[in-house]
Image (cartoon, rainbow, N blue to C red):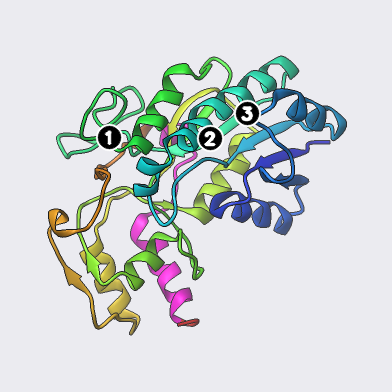
Amino acid sequence: MSHTLILGKGFVGTKLKNYFDNIDFKSTLIGKSDIDYSKSSHLIDFIVQNKITTVVNCSGYTGVPNVDACELNKDLCWLYNVVVPNIITKVCKDLGVPCMHVSSGCIYTGYEKRFTEKDAPNFGLFYTDSSFYSKTKHAFETVADLDYAAILRIRMPFTNTLESKNYLYKIFKYNNLISFDNSLTSIDDLNTFIFKFLHNFKPGIYNVVNTASTNAKHIVEMFRHHNMTNPNWTFVDIDKLDIIAGRSNCVLATDKICSMGLELSDTFTAVDRCIYDLSKHI
């Protein structure tokens, strides 16, 4: 019987556990306070004792309230975005347990193309303008055993709940907004993707985003369509914001997951559905 271990009790990991519970799929969710999985022996013991068949690593360091915090806590950011995922991969490989890491596509920026999984990052380790967070995400890709592990790149995750990590809720609550075209990832679609991918696991890197890009101005229009508004919304230039780290703005290609029959839904449909649900709670 399959038994999936989800690492990380944050925004993504908790939603994945809820999804698995709703479809009666056996899974266990643990966080850093439950087991110190920065120590391989602790993780090995847990996997063996609980007969884990797959590991999904949703843990990492994103910073609170945003990636600016990563510039101030570089040691923790490097530990949980580079060192620990590498430990997890090595443990899983030694035990013969497939593993996937939920990561980020913020290692690209610009609009010269839709970035594929084969494109060299232009907002990662070797670029002075990239955030430290982006550097760590690129760093893990350079050391990960991609003959064994799968990396799922997501962007600006959104859902229908009132949570600080929800991209849609950020747009609704923030007064000063910037508007760049970006790929987004519906958490509902991500969960479905992971479930399907567990049954057709192939190592490598995957852009797991919805099928079209959008921007904050369009999302604000969608909020207003559902009679939701923030009277203090103001669109500003990015250089007017009080931020420390550079921000990634880009569109990721989805040809790879589409060729596998694992494409996510249309972005606008997914966003509209979530805003409609949010409108019933605000």
Label 1 crowd (10 A; few <14 / some 14-19 / many >=20): many
Rendered residue at 54%/43% (across/down)? 193
Image vertical order of residue 236 relative to residue 212, above or below:
below
Q: Quadrant of residue 53?
A: top right
Q: Are marks 2 and 3 in contact (CB under 8 Å)?
A: no
Q: Name the residue type under label 3.
A: Cys
The tag earlier along the polypeptide, 2 or 1, is 2
| Residue, disc 3 | 99
Give me the C-alpha separation between circle 1 and circle 3.
24 Å
Give me the C-alpha separation between circle 2 and circle 3.
16 Å
Q: Nearer the viewer, residue 5 or 267?
A: 5
Q: How many marks?
A: 3
* Residue 249 picture location, percent across and down: 24, 45
Rendered residue at 32%/47% (across/down)? 183
| Residue, disc 2 | 80
Q: Secondary structure at mark 3?
A: strand
* Residue 101 picture location, percent across and down: 54, 33
Q: Name the residue type under label 1.
A: Tyr
Predominant SS of the magenta segment: helix
Label 3 crowd (10 A; few <14 / some 14-19 / many >=20): many
Q: Which residues are magenta?
A: 256-279
| Residue, disc 1 | 108
